[in-house]
Amino acid sequence: MNANTGASSDGSDRLSDRSDRSDRSSDKSGGFKQQSQRRLRPSGGYRTLRSYQVATVIYDATVSFCDRFIDKRSRTNDQMVQAARSGRQNIAEGSRAAATTSQTELRLVNVARASLEELLLDYEDFLRQRKLRTWAKNDPDALTVRATGRQIDPTDRSDPVTHWKAYARWLEHADPAVVANTLICLIHQTNYLLDQQISALERSFIHEGGYSEQLASARMAERQKKNQSDPSDPTDKIPKCPLCGKFLALRTAQKGARAGSQFWGCSGYPECKGTRPLDS
């Protein structure tokens, strides 16, 4: 499971439709290669993610909200728009990164989550500072907004216009408190969905990793296999990292008093910075 695993509006996990993927490789005959013959994982498909769809509504509505209710000369105006944009864009970029590295994918989805949390605080501040009513979790209006997503036809969910129309009676309301409270509900929904994606990504990273992680593992396995089959090969003396236990790689110091000299550095760098002198 990767970032393309989301949750439906009612909280149930689902696998997204990958119909808009553009990363499938094909051979000269036009047939697609089997998954077992390549290490690249499926990526893209973010337009079918419920988190991306609601984040798009949040971004569009935030641009509209700031134009209508926030002074354009205020720094808050730009900060809110950028936070909303970051939430949306990083979901998409994380999905695209899925093919090559789970670590980058996980990092970008976390960035999206943090950006939307920042935006949530801005809307809460707007209501509090103006002494406007904040909807309680079980407020009838809040319950209606949360239920609206379940009423959208799944075949139309990837259309941002359809999503906007579903929430238009709140997002286009003349009362800024109604708009802000609606967006708070939508941000809470999206953050919940992103939490599900992050949990799935963490499990996937532990059990599978991405392309770069699998490639590094395969390289180490091949080196170890070669060392075992050829006792005379000097690489059988490659030491392991004193910190994490991975194989060390021969490196050359680029600067400092020992510039030009060689040393053993952890193959897991930069996550691990373990080293050993060459003569050891």
Image: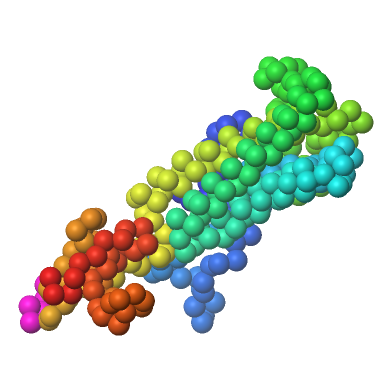
Q: Position of residue 250 (x, y in %)?
A: 25, 75
Task: State yes or no: residue 53 in magenta.
Answer: no
Can residue 227 be seen here? no
Q: Position of residue 94 (x, y in %)?
A: 56, 55
Residue 142 relative to residue 172: left or right = left
Residue 250 relative to residue 114: left or right = left
Q: Position of residue 93 (x, y in %)?
A: 60, 58
| Residue occupying image coordinates x 23% and y 74% | 263
* Residue nearest the observer in this picture, 239 or 18: 239
Main secondary structure found in the magenta portion: loop
- Find the residue positioned furthest to the left: 231
Part of the protein shown in magenta: 228-232
- Find the residue positioned furthest to the right: 174
Q: Is residue 134 above or below residue 179?
A: above
Q: Is residue 124 above or below residue 236?
A: above
- Find the residue positioned furthest to the front: 257
Can residue 167 be seen here? yes
| Residue occupying image coordinates x 36% and y 76% | 255
| Residue occupying image coordinates x 31% and y 61% | 273
Q: Is residue 26 above or below residue 199?
A: below
Q: Position of residue 233 (x, y in %)?
A: 12, 81
| Residue occupying image coordinates x 37% and y 54% | 208
The quadrant in which the C terminus is found is bottom left
